[in-house]
Image (cartoon, helix red, strand yellow):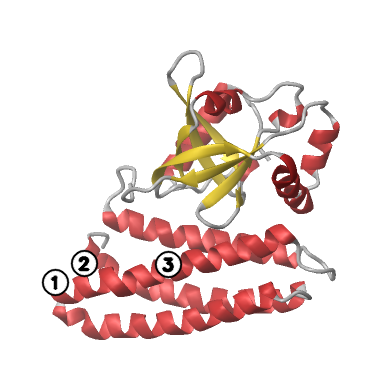
Amino acid sequence: MTHDVPDDFNASVIAEFRANRGAVGGHFAGARLLLLTTTGARSGRPHTTPLGYYPDGDGRVLVIASAGGSPRHPAWYHNLRATPRVTVESGVFTYQADAAVLTGEERDRAFARAVESDRGWAAYQAGTSRVIPVVALTEAPGPPDFGGLGFAEAFTGIHDGFRRELELIRKEVAEQGTGGLGVQLRINCLTFCGGLHTHHTGEDGMMFPALARQHPHLEPVLDRLGREHERVAALLAELERTVSAEDAEPAAVLREVERLTEELEAHLRYEEEALLPVLGGA
């Protein structure tokens, strides 16, 4: 959870986030975190805030304007109400997004999912008379922006992002106990599967053919990576099937997550060892 905090604390988190491609320690260690830059409603100047978020599928994420249960909305919320086009930093990618405040049942369902994941949101809502807003951030069309990172840095940063998300999902599933699988956790899993599938499809269709043309000696390496993509795709499909079952049990999901984690880590490690030298990251 994230709320208005002193500027010096925000500045230190922002600096750490940018220096470590989205990885931070301390209060936010292990959390899903993004940097949201809004345009000041009064000043017109950019303001950047670190915020926790929830995946929502279909290219959008959710942030919650809790302000720690304060009676007033946080400043960033007022800013995006005035100027809905915002900038989001994910750790590797920087992109423009359109902010939309959810209303009615859509807001209530999204907030309930957040409470299901962390009861602290309910405590914040109970502590204030205002309805805590939930905001959807939808990525605007456009080419990828690596925020000044070199290609090799971005390559490993993307991998590390998948590693962090999968480890967080593993932890969340393990903490589900013996009950059914939570709605938000299903979305987290399915969003991860979709993102990794898209990443590997892009490598197969664009990156690997380009490398094969430029570095013919890599053909055996690229063939192996393509076969590994197929094995990972099969594990992703099984995880999706398990997660999507109406009676999905956390123990079964955890087994699939752990199988995927083992296979994916071996694949990413080999890919980095084999390709970073030609990508400029040796």
Quadrant where the image shows the N terminus: top right
Q: Position of residue 151 (x, y in %)?
A: 27, 55
Q: Position of residue 3 (x, y in %)?
A: 66, 31
- The residue identified by callout 1 is 214
Residue 42 visible somewhere in the drawing: yes
Res. 198 mark: 3
Q: Earlier in the sequence, mark 1 or mark 3?
A: 3
Q: Position of residue 13 (x, y in %)?
A: 53, 35
User: Around disc 3, counting alpha carbons within 10 Å, would you say few (fewer than 14), some (14 to 19), or many (20 or more)?
Assistant: few
Real-space CA distance between mark 1 and mark 3, rounded to the nearest whole angstrom? 23 Å
Inspect the image, locate mark 1, and give the three-letter code of the amino acid beneath it. Answer: Gln
User: Around disc 1, counting alpha carbons within 10 Å, would you say few (fewer than 14), some (14 to 19), or many (20 or more)?
Assistant: few
Real-space CA distance between mark 1 and mark 2, rounded to the nearest whole angstrom? 10 Å
Residue 272 visible somewhere in the drawing: no
Q: Residue 180 vs residue 136: left or right?
A: right
Q: Quadrant of residue 131?
A: top right
Q: Earlier in the sequence, mark 1 or mark 2?
A: 1
Compared with residue 14, is residue 7 higher up or lower down, i.e. above or below?
Answer: above
Viewer-nearest of labels 2 and 3? 3
Inspect the image, locate mark 2, and give the three-letter code of the amino acid beneath it. Answer: Val
Q: Earlier in the sequence, mark 2 or mark 3?
A: 3
Q: How many marks?
A: 3
Q: Quadrant of residue 225?
A: bottom left
Residue sitting at 72 percent across and 79 percent down?
252
- The answer to whether mark 2 and mark 3 are in CB contact below 8 A is no
- The residue identified by callout 2 is 278
Viewer-nearest of labels 1 and 2? 1
Residue sitting at 53 percent across and 43 percent down?
137
Res. 195 mark: none
Compared with residue 77, is residue 242 higher up or lower down, i.e. above or below?
Answer: below
- Indicate the secondary structure of the residue bearing disc 3: helix
Inspect the image, locate mark 3, and give the three-letter code of the amino acid beneath it. Answer: Thr
